[in-house]
Image (spheres, rainbow, N blue to C red):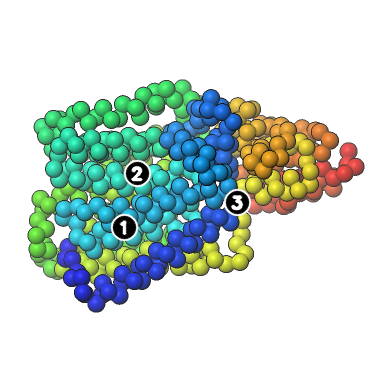
Amino acid sequence: MKTLPPTHPLERAIVPLLALGVVLLGFARLRFAATEPLWFDEAFTLAITSQPDWSGFWREVYLDSNGPAFYLLLRLWTDLFGASDLALRIPSLLAVAAAGAIPLVTPLRGLSRSARTTWAVLIFAWWGVGYFLDARCYGVLLAVSTGQCLAFARLLDRPDRKRALVWAATGAVAILFHYYAVFLGLAQGLIYLGWCRQRAVRTWPAALAFVPAFAWIAYHWPRLADYSRLAAVWHAPIDGRRAFELVGFAIGPTSPVILPAVAVVLAAGLLAAVAGRSAAPGEDRATARPLTLTAASGLLAFALMLAFGVLGSGLSPRYLIPVAPPLLLGIVLVACAGPRGNLTCAALIVLYAGLLVQPTLAAFAPARPLPRYEFETGSRFLMDHGVTDVVFAWDHELAPIMTATTLARVGGAFFDRAGRPIRIHPIVLDPGRDPNRDIVQAARGPRPGLIWLFNRDGRTAAHRFAPAIARDPHWLCTAPGGGAAGALACYRRAGAP
């Protein structure tokens, strides 16, 4: 991979444009984070991190299906900076920026400056404008996984206990943010042992860094088993089409055309490399092997995740975030190879940046559609009309394993944050019964209201019985309750029976 001279005209033109693009994308993400209401999963984060005491916090962390690291980070963060929508999302904003900066500030032997820049841009752009830019673990997970890949490449380049400890500690932290990160650690561990053999064995004390992560998993396992039993119910089955979609997500979730577009760029890069018939100066196979194996660890981890999902444990696209950095590195290695590698790298940058132009401009538009699966807007609506009691119905396959306390905390999260605590009456819906009748019958109190989060595509009550409460003249609602998924918030009109 040939590095451009500092005074090369192409570099002088690209660097200011990249800087401008990064600034615009950063402001678009900031505006999105400051103006969009929290979606449903973020409400869970708010409910867990705003527990009044630490015992309640750890109880809710245990009852959730995710690792504890992000909740602990956000609990400490909100103690300092508050729990507004923007404050809850700032750690993710900073983490995604850090993920893109890590390759720039961490040189790797065999990876040229132009290749590192391309990798950094792809990681930063991979996140899009509003895609998973939320108060969940995924932004921080992307940053930690990027650091883990860099640590792994450095370890393969020169195996020693210090580098092994850095890699193991980073991998353990990633697991504590999201359990599916264990597949990347497993893939890299297998490659490390297979490639370095005795040198790898001599660094065994570094493996002790994984002990806290696996100790927590062992403690959390009984609760995780509850979720695992329902995995086949609430995760889509993985067939050939679904697997192809998952590959596309790992390469770039912001556009369905990115996978074929990347394939075209890589094909052009390969043809250029073959036509060149020579490696760039100073970049022999031995130097490039650690980078190639790091990229291969992403492929192996993806295959392990896919197999795990096929066997019945389920696989949501966002669980693939740990494999995105190594897979993007693999794309960069292919694209930047050969005598015209810099041009192919530039084409990759233009591709990923170009797909973000429309979402970035849309983020600055005065009116944007609200996310459908959120009830912050509905909670404000009910607060404005002075409700005293709210029936909270999360119409989801996982609702039956949630405790009433958890559902009540989630349903009242926005009321509590606003200093307007009310009585929340959680209800678990029966998929075989009409929820329109059951929810209305559960309404009580002097000024009753309701919040119904529905998903008509799942194995839920709304799948069989469409939301129809908005058509009841005794109730006034925020929306008619149409669409495949959404939230309905209503209050009973004064004088209605």
Q: Describe the element under mark 3 as helix, strand or loop.
A: loop
- What's under tag 2, amino acid-wise? Val
Q: Nearer the viewer, residue 154 or 359?
A: 154
Report the quarter where the C terminus lies: top right
Earlier in the chain: of badge 1 and badge 2, it is 1
Q: Is residue 450 visible?
A: yes
Vertical placement of residue 237 versus 356, above or below: above
Q: Residue 37: which disc?
A: 3
Q: Nearer the viewer, residue 227 or 424?
A: 424
For the point 15% across and 37% down, the residue is: 160
How many marks do you count on the picture? 3
For the point 48% across and 25% down, the residue is: 223
For the point 58% across and 47% down, the residue is: 84
- Cα–Cα gap, marks 3 and 2: 26 Å
Residue beneath label 1, please?
A: 120
- Cα–Cα gap, marks 1 and 3: 29 Å
Q: Residue 144: which disc?
A: 2
Vertical placement of residue 340 versus 369, above or below: below
Q: Write down the quadrant of residue 158 in the picture.
A: top left
- What's under tag 1, amino acid-wise? Ala
Determine whether, in the image, residue 142 is placed left or right of residue 57. Answer: left
Determine whether, in the image, residue 337 is placed left or right of residue 407. Answer: left
Q: Describe the element under mark 2 as helix, strand or loop.
A: helix
Q: Residue 9: which disc?
A: none
Q: Nearer the viewer, residue 466 or 326?
A: 326
- What's under tag 3, amino acid-wise? Pro
